[in-house]
Image (spheres, rainbow, N blue to C red):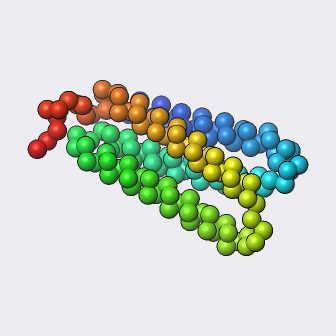
C-alpha cells in the first residue's frame, strides 16, 4: 500500500514538473502578451501543495474500513482546496490592488481544473485497487 501510494504522489509530482516546464519555456510568450509568470509559478506551486495535501487525505480515507471516513476526507480536502485558493486570491488582490493580471488568474483557474481532474483520476484508481484496505463488498460495511 505504501509503495502504491508513493506512485500516486510521484504522478502528481510529474504533473507539477510538466506544468512548471510549460511555464518556464513559455516565459517569452507570456511577456509578449503581458502575462505575469510569477502569478503562474505561485499558482502552480500552491495548487500542487493543496493537491498533495488532498491526495494524502484521500489515501488515508481510502485505506480505512469505514466508508464515512473516505467521504469526510473528500469533503474536507475540497474545503481546504477552495479556502486555500480563495485566500491566495484575496492576498493577491490585496497586494496588487487594481493592477491585477487577469489572464494569469484565468490560466491559474485552468491549472486548478487540471489538478482537480488529475486528482479525481488518481482517487478513482486508488478506490479500484483491491489492496487499499477496504473490502468493497457489501458485507464489509460495519453496522
The residue most toward the top is 130
133 relative position to 94: left or right:
left
* Residue at left offset 47%, top offset 34%: 121
The residue most toward the right is 32
Q: Position of residue 103 (x, y in %)?
A: 74, 54
Quadrant in which residue 34 is drawn: bottom right
* Residue at left offset 35%, top offset 50%: 73
47 relative position to 27: left or right:
left
Q: Nearer the viewer, residue 64 or 117?
A: 117
* Residue at left offset 38%, top offset 48%: 74
Q: How many marks?
A: 0
Residue 41 visible in the picture: no
Vertical relation: 11 (above or below) 78: above
Q: Position of residue 40 (x, y in %)?
A: 70, 51
Q: Position of residue 131 (x, y in %)?
A: 30, 28
* Residue at left offset 85%, top offset 44%: 29
Quadrant in which residue 136 is drawn: top left
Residue 136 visible in the picture: yes
On-image quarter of the C terminus: top left
Quadrant in which residue 70 is drawn: top left
91 relative position to 8: left or right:
right
Q: Position of residue 31 (x, y in %)?
A: 86, 50
Amino acid at each position: 500500500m505504501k509503495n502504491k501510494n508513493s506512485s500516486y504522489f510521484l504522478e502528481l509530482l510529474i504533473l507539477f514538473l510538466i506544468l512548471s516546464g510549460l511555464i518556464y519555456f513559455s516565459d517569452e510568450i507570456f511577456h509578449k502578451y503581458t502575462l505575469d509568470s510569477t502569478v503562474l509559478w505561485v499558482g502552480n506551486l500552491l495548487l500542487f501543495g493543496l493537491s498533495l495535501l488532498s491526495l494524502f487525505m484521500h489515501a488515508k480515507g481510502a485505506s480505512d474500513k469505514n466508508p464515512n471516513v473516505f467521504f469526510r476526507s473528500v469533503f474536507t480536502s475540497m474545503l481546504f482546496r477552495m479556502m486555500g485558493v480563495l485566500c491566495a486570491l484575496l492576498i493577491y488582490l490585496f497586494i496588487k490592488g487594481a493592477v491585477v493580471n487577469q489572464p494569469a488568474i484565468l490560466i491559474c483557474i485552468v491549472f486548478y481544473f487540471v489538478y482537480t481532474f488529475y486528482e479525481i483520476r488518481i482517487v478513482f484508481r486508488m478506490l479500484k485497487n483491491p489492496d487499499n484496505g477496504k473490502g468493497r463488498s457489501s458485507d464489509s460495511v460495519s453496522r
